[in-house]
Image: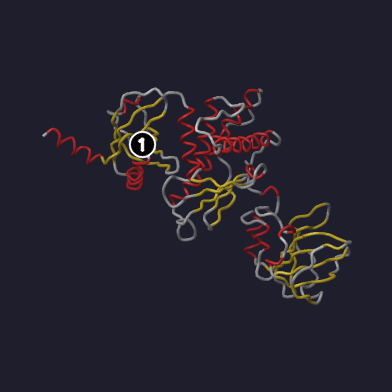
Amino acid sequence: MWQPEGTKLECDKLGSLEPREVLYEYAGEPLTFVASDPEGEPLLVHSLSAFDRTSRYLVSAIDSRILQDLKAGRIDILTGLRQTRCWIADLAEDASINAIWRVEFTSIPQNVLPRPGAMLNPDLDPLFRLRLVGSGVGPGKTSAADIRMAAQAAESGLRGLARVALDEKKKVGTVPRDVRHFSDLPYLFSRAASFEIAFGRPHDRLPGLDDEVFAEMGRLLERGLKVLRANSESPLAIEGLDADQTVQLFEAIKALTPPTRGAVDRVEIGGELVDELSGSRVLTRDDRVRSVQRIKASRKAPRKEAPFRISGVVEEADQGNLSFKLRQLDPAEATVVGGATEIPFVFEEHLYDTVMEAFNSLERMVVVGERVDSVYQALDVQLAVEATDAEDAKSE
């Protein structure tokens, strides 16, 4: 058993360490609980190990905010325990205190501490979390667009994984839920450092079936990343998936990767869906380039239609997926798209600034696009006023 590195104190230094609120117990034994110091201030007490009929606990001085965050699942146990003032306490079978040491948190062996990300209650563990990393991300730096991108990337990536996972369920006649159930997950918490957002399991769970689908989604992600990062110039087939499913899987991975430009240059993904197989993964811009290449190589030759011209307002844009929705269409022009009320466009990198400016300004725009199979591709985007002026100049 490791020996605490610190100053040994009188056994009554922290009071009796009697639980005033049990936060987690196993077989009737409190493993994580709140006690009070002699001044009545809260102490977070967590079991580290047991030996020779003695239980060793880590005791940390906390405040009410830390306790609330821990109980709500906004911070993990390790974060709650990592405090400036902490002690190691050995308790006998009768709960009497055998020894207490004042220690530095950094002196405690990592192998006895809770694993990073472990919540107070397993039900609070994130199913999926996504962290943005980059020089332009963090407290006072993260923009609203970055936050929106993180949420959209998580939802889009999970949606793609769920589609393929449910396809496999349909083959054996079991379809427990629709795609939205496995992708539009409840928000758990966010953290400011580099900006992290976490999602939990659906509230209306189907025990067993839900677990199977989420486990399959994790396996698909692992298999897709393995193929994506393989040293090969040609597209590699993924065993058990047809061509369309393979494209969907690469699309899901692409949605989780960082944009090719901007403040975010890496995306870390984790949570139970990922950690069960390989631990947290870091996706880079190289992964985005590879996924785009795989998608293009795996798709059949597209069927293109003649380019068309239409005006409207860019009311929604996804900078991570290079896509936008054009709404408030001119009814006279909308006939070229079957009278639709909105058109979802994808666009190439060179149109990025123009599209983002259009989204932020909500000015009326003219889009020259084409339909490739079922996808609308924007070929050019410009202000409607400028487009009209250019047309007038040509006619003079």
Q: Residue at x 82, y 74 (%)?
A: 11
Looking at the image, residue 168 lies above or below residue 140:
above
Q: Quadrant of residue 114?
A: bottom right
Q: Residues within 10 Å of mark 1 (few under 14, many from 20)?
A: many
The image shows residue 3 at horizontal and vertical percentages of 79, 67
Point 59% across, 46% down: residue: 281
Instruction: Identify whether 347 is placed above or below 237.
Output: below
Outermost residue, bottom side: 10
The picture places residue 324, in percent across and down from the top left corner, at 39, 38
Q: Secondary structure at mark 1?
A: strand
211, 266: nearer the viewer: 266
Query: Across the whole image, how many numbered discs are drawn on residues?
Result: 1
Q: Quadrant of residue 64?
A: bottom right
Given the image, on which type of amino acid does mark 1 rest? Leu
Residue 169 as seen in the image, left or right of residue 292: right
Q: Is residue 83 left or right of residue 225?
A: right
Colouring scheme, one of rainbow, by chain, secondary structure, one colour: secondary structure
Residue 22 at x, y percent in the picture: 76, 59
Residue that lies at the very extreme toward the left in this rendered image: 396
Q: Residue at x 75, y 59 (%)?
A: 112
- Whether residue 83 sits left or right of residue 297 in the image: it is right
Instruction: From the viewer's perspective, tell me whether residue 390 is left or right of residue 27.
Output: left
Residue at 66% from the left image edge and 55% from the top image edge: 116
Q: Looking at the rendering, in which quadrant would you find the C terminus? A: top left
- In the displayed structure, 234 sits above or below 349; it is above
- Specify the quadrant that holds the N terminus: bottom right
Residue at the spot of label 1 = 326
